[in-house]
Amino acid sequence: MKKKSGINRRDFIFNTAKTSIGLTLGLSALSNYAMANDNQKILTTKFDTGFDQKPLPYAYDALENVIDALTMEIHYTKHAAGYSKNLKEAVTTENVPLGTSVEKILSNISSYSTKMRNNAGGHYNHEMFWQCMQPKSLDNKPKGKLMEAIEKHFTSFENFKIKFDDAAKTRFGSGWAWLYADNNHNLHIGSTPNQDNPLMNISEIKGFPLLGLDVWEHAYYLMYQNKRAEYVENWWKLVNWDYVSNRYASI
Ligand code: MN3
């Protein structure tokens, strides 16, 4: 993986511009500007999320035995559809400039309403979640550079799964478990409450999400009831590692 170090000419010009803007607008404006631009680096990927739902990449019943068809249908057509609809409403009400991406909104989410936070997060998380899964395969493991990075950061794939499972099982109430990368491509595991995610400037964990697991009860309750751990364990059979690898390669 390429690492960026030192100050090149472009950074120098950019930082100089930042300083002049800081002098004009005052220090708090400077720190907001700097924060938005630090996040920007990691947001510029080919995985930009639109405001509308993309079609589900498989049938509702394609994940049966791990996630039942009715759960998938309600999850996609009711819960996730609601986040997309409410996000678009919030974008209109809060006069978000035309052309602003969902990612950009998330990176500056502290400037918006709770409605925006819940629904921009909800929409982004679900659009990613559907792609993170595929009909189950037998030997389901990451390959290549992603596997190397997982082994480097978590010792082994098994150890990585234990840590991720722990993040998913111990998230109290509703939320998400994440594998995410920081700007130096180091991998981390963590969880967020509700529909928050690591792209949000208010999140305790920050970075680019590579793999996300929905641990809201609506994601598993019909089949697993209170047994979240069983859902999490079964869910590994569905992970679309090619998609996760592509996200990793995009940063
Ligand atoms: Mn959900």
Image (cartoon, rainbow, N blue to C red):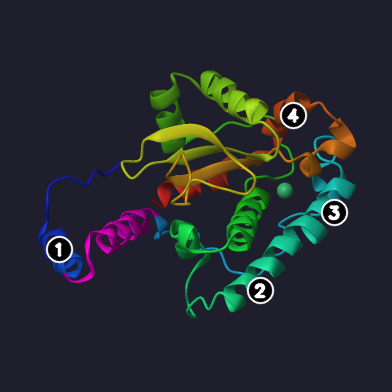
Type of the residue with mark 3? Ile
Residue that mark 1 sits on:
19
Spatial separation of the CA atoms under disc 2 and disc 1? 36 Å
Mark 3 falls on what kind of element? helix
Mark nearer the viewer, 3 or 4 = 3
Which numbered disc flags the more N-terminal residue, 2 or 1? Answer: 1
Q: For the residues labelled 4 and 1, say whether their Cβ atoms are less than 8 Å apart.
A: no
Neighbours of disc 1 within 10 Å: few (<14), some (14-19), many (20+): some
Residue 17, position in %: x, y?
15, 68
Residue that mark 4 sits on:
234
Spatial separation of the CA atoms under disc 3 and disc 1? 50 Å
Residue 141 higher or lower than 135, as above or below: above
Which numbered disc flags the more N-terminal residue, 3 or 1? Answer: 1
Q: What range of the chain is rendered magenta?
A: 24-42
Type of the residue with mark 1? Thr
Q: In this image, 106 relative to 219: left or right?
A: left
Residue 39, position in %: x, y?
36, 54
Residue that mark 2 sits on:
89
